[in-house]
């Protein structure tokens, strides 16, 4: 469930600068003045999920080397991304009709494919590629396929691994056709078939850390890298650095696909430009550096991470069976147009999404908006739903979350109480209400509501963790330590890489580390 934005005043200019400078150094993200409100909201959301009592304390924690949980919270809050299946018709036409067939022809002697979706968000892009490969390869089972998908946002990665999507993800006609082949309807969501889901490996990777190309991160000898609408958030210097590393991650004749709004062609001057209808792609043809001075990449000064440098790899020794001039379309069974019911019209701007079905889909859409941090939009839909369905506890609970995310505590509290009156077992309503009361300074009431959360579900880690922080804030240290112990005991039974439910992407291992540190600090009080 969404985290609440703590009711703090807007950032002062010096606060905005130091947080934005920190994010630039750690992950290359730029937050100019026109994105100030976005960063402000993200900081307060991450701060609300921490155990800190002030923004200064939160910032000082973020600066500590190796401190991962708070930084993950902040990164997840400011990099909430949204995409959909087969986004950008022109690019996917080129991928299906040209790029993948050429790669397949070139690699048919060794039956090996390596593809990387860098900045994969919630998984629609790599899963789209996986579906195309199933369409293109009649002997699919005989191929060894690596389909790596990475992102810096652990919350998005968790959603991607689950492979469950709403109608919102199928805005393209091509996506709706593929949905009938590779998805199963489950209530108001569509679950991706395991055969497609298992093709993709999801990993966290920060593109501004020098951890690629490297065998350890499985980022060498790629045939295709797709990195769309990611570097638009980087500075020009960082973008050049990332693109150079992508070049060295590719095998000879490998492809790089970027978004239409990416920087100028100068950024990709090491690549050969390939023009296809309504799109431009980039291909690595030769290793010019192998005949002269080796190309070196120095890390931009703005990125001072304490990470182990990785030297550039030499890919010139890989032997493949070339299909000849890859600039020309090849004629194979695979190069037929992607199956559609009717010819597609020229690409045009997508209109605002309007759910086609009735109230259940509207609720799913509002739920999706809440997950993406778009509380104002969700609230407008939910208000209409509440008028049409006044006894629906889920709608009331979501309204409570929406208003809480916007800092409207009075409305949030009212809708949570209304949800509880309709459903006495609504854990989400009690949890949101407890956090609202905490933000209002009513700690005793907040603790009582959070006790109901852990009573309803004794395995709910965030309930015990939230209770610990409330006890700590009210100076009840023995009770706080006991609640931390309860949370830690539950976490020890879970895999370290698993994401804690409801945590916006925090892994079990990182929350365990944070709790251990809190135990040490609180025991000294």
Image (cartoon, rainbow, N blue to C red):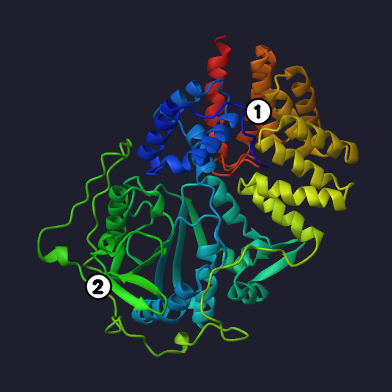
Q: Residue furthest top?
A: 525
Q: In which quarter of the image is residue 181?
A: bottom right
As helix, strand or loop, the secondary structure at mark 1 comes to helix
Q: Depth-wise, is mark 2 or mark 1 nearer the camera?
A: 2
Indicate which disc residue 485 carries.
Answer: none
As helix, strand or loop, the secondary structure at mark 2 comes to loop
Number of numbered discs: 2
Viewer-closest of 418 and 178: 418
User: Label 1: how many residues lie within 10 Å, few (<14), some (14-19) or many (20+)?
Assistant: many
Q: Quadrant of residue 180?
A: bottom right
Task: Give the residue drawn at x 14%, y 64%.
Answer: 290
Indicate which disc residue 465 carries.
Answer: 1
Q: Counting residues from the N terminus, which is met first, the one under dot 2 or under dot 1?
A: 2
**Height in image: 334 above or below 58?**
below
Viewer-closest of 371 and 500: 371
Q: Quadrant of the C terminus?
A: top right
- Left or right side of 17 for 509: right
Q: Name the residue under label 2.
A: 285
Viewer-closest of 381 and 195: 381
Q: Residue 389 location, x and y as percent?
A: 87, 51
User: Label 2: how many residues lie within 10 Å, few (<14), some (14-19) or many (20+)?
Assistant: some
Task: Give the residue drawn at x 70%, y 35%.
Answer: 404
Q: Residue 32 location, x and y as percent?
A: 41, 41
3D distance between C-alphas at marks 2 and 1: 54 Å
Q: Residue 246 location, x and y as percent?
A: 32, 59
Viewer-closest of 395 and 255: 395
**Height in image: 146 above or below 240?**
below
Is residue 66 visible from the viewing direction of this image? Answer: no
Q: Quadrant of the N terminus?
A: top right
Is residue 149 visible from the viewing direction of this image? Answer: yes
């Amino acid at each position: 469930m969404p985290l609440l934005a703590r009711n703090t005043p807007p950032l002062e200019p010096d606060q905005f600068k130091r947080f934005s400078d920190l994010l630039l150094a750690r992950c290359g993200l730029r937050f100019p003045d026109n994105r100030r409100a976005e960063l402000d909201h993200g900081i307060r959301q991450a701060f609300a999920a921490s155990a800190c009592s002030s923004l200064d304390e939160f910032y000082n924690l973020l600066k500590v080397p190796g401190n991962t949980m708070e930084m993950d919270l902040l990164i997840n809050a400011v990099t909430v991304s949204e995409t959909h299946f087969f986004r950008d018709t022109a690019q996917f036409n080129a991928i299906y009709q040209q790029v993948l067939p050429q790669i397949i022809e070139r690699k048919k002697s060794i039956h090996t494919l390596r593809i990387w979706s860098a900045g994969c968000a919630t998984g629609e892009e790599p899963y789209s590629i996986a579906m195309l490969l199933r369409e293109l390869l009649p002997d699919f089972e005989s191929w060894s396929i690596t389909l790596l998908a990475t992102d810096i946002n652990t919350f998005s990665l968790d959603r991607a691994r689950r492979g469950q999507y709403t109608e919102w993800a199928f805005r393209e006609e091509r996506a709706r056709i593929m949905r009938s082949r590779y998805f199963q309807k489950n209530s108001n969501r569509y679950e991706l078939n395991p055969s497609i889901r298992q093709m993709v490996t999801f990993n966290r990777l920060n593109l501004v850390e020098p951890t690629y190309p490297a065998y350890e991160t499985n980022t060498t000898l790629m045939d295709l890298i797709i990195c769309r609408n990611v570097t638009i958030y980087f500075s020009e210097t960082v973008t050049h650095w990332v693109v150079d590393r992508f070049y060295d991650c590719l095998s000879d004749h490998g492809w790089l696909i970027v978004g239409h709004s990416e920087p100028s062609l100068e950024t990709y001057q090491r690549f050969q430009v390939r023009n296809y209808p309504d799109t431009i792609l980039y291909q690595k043809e030769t290793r010019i550096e192998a005949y002269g001075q080796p190309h070196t990449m120095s890390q931009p000064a703005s990125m001072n991470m304490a990470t182990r440098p990785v030297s550039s790899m030499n890919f010139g020794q890989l032997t493949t069976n070339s299909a000849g001039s890859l600039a020309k379309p090849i004629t194979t069974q695979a190069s037929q147009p992607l199956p559609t019911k009717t010819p597609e019209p020229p690409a045009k701007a997508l209109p605002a999404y309007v759910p086609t079905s009735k109230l259940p889909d509207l609720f799913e859409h509002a739920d999706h908006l809440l997950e993406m941090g778009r509380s104002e939009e969700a609230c407008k839909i939910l208000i209409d739903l509440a008028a049409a369905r006044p006894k629906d506890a889920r709608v009331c609970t979501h309204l409570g979350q929406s208003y809480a995310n916007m800092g409207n505590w009075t409305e949030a509290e009212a809708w949570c109480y209304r949800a509880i009156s309709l459903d006495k077992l609504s854990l989400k309503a009690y949890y949101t209400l407890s956090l609202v009361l905490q933000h209002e300074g009513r700690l005793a009431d907040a603790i009582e509501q959070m006790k109901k959360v852990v009573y309803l579900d004794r395995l709910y880690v965030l309930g015990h963790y939230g209770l610990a922080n409330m006890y700590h804030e009210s100076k009840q240290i023995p009770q706080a330590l006991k609640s931390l112990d309860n949370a830690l005991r539950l976490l020890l039974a879970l895999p370290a890489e698993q994401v804690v439910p409801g945590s916006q992407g925090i892994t079990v291992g990182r929350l365990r580390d944070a709790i251990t540190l809190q135990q040490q600090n609180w025991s000294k009080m």
